[in-house]
Amino acid sequence: MLSQIARHIPKAHRIFYRVLPLLGGLVVAKLVMHRFGVEVLSINTLFSGLIGANVFLMGFLLSGVLSDYKESERLPGEMAAILATLADEMQSIHRRSRAPVALAGLAHLSRLGTTLHRWMHKQERTRAVMGLIGDLNDHFLAVEGHTQANFIARLKQEQSALRKIVIRIHTIRETDFISSGYFIARTTTLLLLLGLVFARIEPFYESLFFLGLVSYLLLFLLFLIRDLDNPFGYYENESSEDVSLKPLEDAMADLEARLALEQAAVAPQG
């Protein structure tokens, strides 16, 4: 039920709606503490310094995940460019020689593009993707007699580059950025928010305002950093800051169109 609701929430607002229930819970807890008179802490300069230190720590984590995020923005485009380059050569070989092996290579590239897209959504295993990339060797060997040797060497370079991109994406989405940093950020944020709940600030409406503002800032930063740490979270309903797969989707459509065109060209001869 919750996953279906999450799909209908605009991506730009998903973090806000994840923070909102926690924010409401803190406000309710503050009202309860005030009602029973158990606000036993006082706000001083040391408490303000702790909030500043926590924000500084989150800024450090944010700058770290942003570097990986900016790199990740390029990877789907580079993957699409490699598929297009490989398809160009297979298509040109087929147009020159009408070799069935070139058409088979083009069909393999179309299947590889579809598998890569499914893999991005964790509907395929990394092992299967790497297997299809390795199977390109058979197609390169089959068309070797229909093209120049330096062209095959260039195709092998593109194959190697594609393999490196897949490994890099797998590493980014399976590895957390400084797990101990996340742990201390979460624990200090929890303690600071509990401190605000038990803090005595007069007048009371000011305490609610500062609790809500500081809680919103710290919780939003925590969720944002966690979301940015995996720019390929298409398989997560609550993920909002994912890099665009439009280049790869355009490449898939292009590969299918090329394959259909070459198959149509062969059909009359058949």
Image (cartoon, helix red, strand yellow):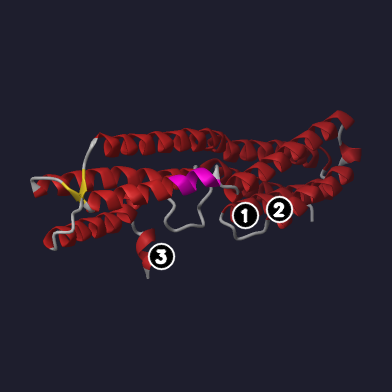
Residue 31 figure quarter = bottom left
Give left or right: position of 208 versus 76.
Answer: left
State the separation of the CA atoms marked 2 and 3: 28 Å
Residue at 27% across, 36% down: 48
Q: Earlier in the sequence, mark 3 or mark 1?
A: 3
Q: Nearer the viewer, residue 48 or 109?
A: 48
Residue at 89% across, 31% down: 149
Q: Which residue is disc 1 drawn over?
A: 119
Q: Examine the structure image and report whether residue 180 is included in the region drawn in magenta.
A: yes
Q: Are marks 3 and 1 in contact (CB under 8 Å)?
A: no
Say which of marks 2 and 3 sits in front: 3
Residue at 86% across, 49% down: 138
Q: Are marks 2 and 1 in contact (CB under 8 Å)?
A: yes
Q: Are marks 2 and 3 in contact (CB under 8 Å)?
A: no
Q: Nearer the viewer, residue 160 or 150?
A: 160
Q: Which residue is disc 2 drawn over?
A: 129
